[in-house]
Structures are given as C-alpha cells and as structure tokens.
Image (spheres, grey):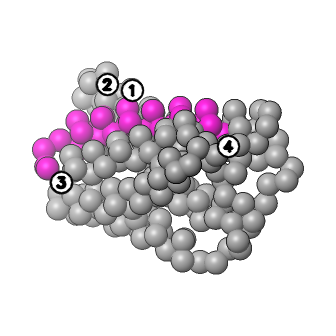
C-alpha cells in the first residue's frame, strides 16, 4: 500500500513539475512565442532555459512511469485497465525521451514528441472504456473528454507553432493525473 501512496503522489506532482519547469523556461526565453514556436524549441536554447525544460520533462516522465505502476494496482483486475496503465507508462517513457533527446537530436526527438501526444489520448480512451465497464461513469466520461480534447486541440489553428495545442493537451494530462493521483492516495489512506 505504500507504493500506491507513492504512485498517487507521483501522479499529482509529475504534471506540476512539468508545467512549472516549462513556465520557468519560457520566462527565461524572451524570444519564445506561443503562436510561432513549439515548446520543444525551449530544449535547445542556451543557458538555464534548456536545463529547466529538459530536466522538468525527464523528472515528470519518470514520475509518470511510477504513477502508471500504481495504476496497475489501483485499477486492479481487468485486462483493459492494465492495458491503459501500460500505455500510460509508455507515454511516461516518451515524455522522458523528449527531455533526454533535445530538438537537435533528430529524428529521436520528433519520434518521442509524436509518441507522447499520440499515446495520451489512446491511454485515455482505454481507461475511459474500463471506467465505464466498472460503473465509474463520471470518471469514464471525464476521461473520454480528456481523450477527445487531446485530439481536438490539434485541429484548431493557433498559428505556425504548436506550443498552444501542446500546452492544452498537457493541461488535460495534468487534470486527469492529479484527479487519479488523489484518488489513489485517498484509497490508500482508507485502506489503513
């Protein structure tokens, strides 16, 4: 049960660390434009900008993997929920890889980025189906909305860059991860 608590806390703090580090990197990058750049443009800038961005993603990706292992235990039982947790763990690996392979390491960075933004909505679809099958209706529908939103934001033109859809998609991950992290943490507290 201690691992469930650690995993839940990881799910809560992973997106907070990622967004804090990204926002700090943007603050140190006066040339960054939300409509002209990708967030990954921050990972190759000189000075503290790249360090903040890359370490934030690496740490958050590792925490996401820990969170996913807790999801295996928390959503025990069904093959569908375990599949969702496995896909989410792979998404954590992709997030870590984005930080490990900066934008100038081609094509690895591109593959890691695309994988991250593809696996998130796929894992959410799998989780959504699993939640609905176990009568967790609110959680199921909110997870479907996160999956749909993670796809729809890419269809909206925000400019030449992709920083806005990346951020919006990431905010959906943030909300979902924090909600499930709290549920895992409190389930552990009730079990004592």
Residue 3: mark in rendering: 2
Q: Residue at x 54, y 71 (%)?
A: 154
- In the rendered image, the vertical position of residue 112 relative to residue 60, given as above or below: below
Residue 164: mark in rendering: none
| Mark found first going from the N terminus, 2 or 4 | 2
Please name which of the two marks, 3 or 2, marks the residue nearer to the observer.
3
CA–CA distance in space, label 3 to label 1: 23 Å
From the image, tell me which residue sits under label 3: 80
Task: Check residue 74 for magenta coloring.
Answer: yes
**Residue 23's spot in the image, x, y percent?**
72, 45
Q: Residue at x 85, y 53 (%)?
A: 31
Please name which of the two marks, 2 or 4, marks the residue nearer to the observer.
4
Q: Secondary structure at mark 4?
A: helix
| Residue 76 in view in this figure | yes
Q: Which residues are magenta?
A: 53-79
Q: Secondary structure at mark 1?
A: helix
- In the rendered image, the vertical position of residue 76 relative to residue 145, given as above or below: above
């Amino acid at each position: 049960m201690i691992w469930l608590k650690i995993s839940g806390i990881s799910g809560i703090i992973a997106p907070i660390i990622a967004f804090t580090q990204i926002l700090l990197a943007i603050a140190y990058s006066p040339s960054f434009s939300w409509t002209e750049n990708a967030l990954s443009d921050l990972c190759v800038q000189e000075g503290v900008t790249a360090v903040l961005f890359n370490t934030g993603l690496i740490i958050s990706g590792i925490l996401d993997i820990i969170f996913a292992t807790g999801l295996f235990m928390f959503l025990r039982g069904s093959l569908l929920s375990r599949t969702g947790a496995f896909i989410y763990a792979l998404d954590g690996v992709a997030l870590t890889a984005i930080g490990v392979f900066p934008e100038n390491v081609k094509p690895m960075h591109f593959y890691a980025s695309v994988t991250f933004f593809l696996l998130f909505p796929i894992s959410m679809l799998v989780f959504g189906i699993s939640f609905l099958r176990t009568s967790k209706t609110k959680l199921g529908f909110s997870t479907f909305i996160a999956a749909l939103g993670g796809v729809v934001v890419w269809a909206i033109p925000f400019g030449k860059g992709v920083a806005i859809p990346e951020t919006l998609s990431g905010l959906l991950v943030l909300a979902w991860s924090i909600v499930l992290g709290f549920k895992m943490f409190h389930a552990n507290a009730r079990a004592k």
